[in-house]
Amino acid sequence: MLWAALNSVLLVNAGWDPYPYILLNLFLSMLAGLQGAILLIAAKRQDAIAAAMAQHDYETNVRAKAEIEQLMAVNREQLEMLQELRVLLHRGDARPDSPSKPRPYGAAGERS
């Protein structure tokens, strides 16, 4: 607005950019071109950052999945062991010489 006021009203005959304001249009067009390029560069940089973060998230998820699968395998093994122990307990198959069952005391009160 200042440009138009200076060139049209104040400097009626000595204005450096008469009514169609060609010089002003040139400046504004150059500014728009520079802003467009800067915005494209910023968008490309943001896309690169987003892609790097997505790759990092993917790698983290793959590692977490492997750890969870390992923990699930350990859990399965423990459940199988517990089931075997329950079966042994219900059958009464515990051998007298096994270390898990205490030996009977002798006559003197000592373990034999």
Image (cartoon, rainbow, N blue to C red):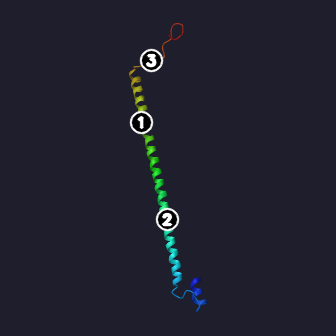
Quadrant in the picture for residue 2: bottom right
Quadrant in the picture for residue 5: bottom right
Give the mark nearest the N terminus, 3 or 1. 1
The amino acid on which the numbered mark 1 sits, given as a three-letter code, is: Ala
Separation (CA) of disc 3 from disc 2: 75 Å
Separation (CA) of disc 2 from disc 1: 48 Å
Residue 93 falls left or right of residue 36: left
The one nearer the camera, 73 or 81, is 73
Residue under circle 3?
Answer: 98
Circle 3 Cα neighbour tier, 10 Å, few/some/many (<14 / 14–19 / ≥20)? few
Circle 2 Cα neighbour tier, 10 Å, few/some/many (<14 / 14–19 / ≥20)? few
The amino acid on which the numbered mark 3 sits, given as a three-letter code, is: Ser
Q: Secondary structure at mark 3?
A: loop
Residue at 59 percent across and 90 percent down: it is 14
**Could you say where residue 16 lies in the image, as x and y percent from the top left?**
57, 87
- Above or below, comparing residue 55 to residue 46 in the picture: above
**Could you say where residue 61 lies in the image, as x and y percent from the top left?**
45, 47
Residue 85 falls left or right of residue 1: left
Residue under circle 2?
Answer: 41
The amino acid on which the numbered mark 2 sits, given as a three-letter code, is: Ile
Cβ atoms under marks 3 and 2 closer than 8 Å: no
- Above or below, comparing residue 21 to residue 55 in the picture: below
Quadrant in the picture for residue 73: top left
Give the mark nearest the N terminus, 3 or 2. 2
Circle 1 Cα neighbour tier, 10 Å, few/some/many (<14 / 14–19 / ≥20)? few
**Could you say where residue 91 lies in the image, as x and y percent from the top left?**
38, 22
Q: Secondary structure at mark 2?
A: helix
Residue under circle 1?
Answer: 73
- Above or below, comparing residue 101 to residue 76 in the picture: above
**Could you say where residue 21 lies in the image, as x and y percent from the top left?**
52, 85
Separation (CA) of disc 3 from disc 1: 28 Å
Q: Secondary structure at mark 1?
A: helix
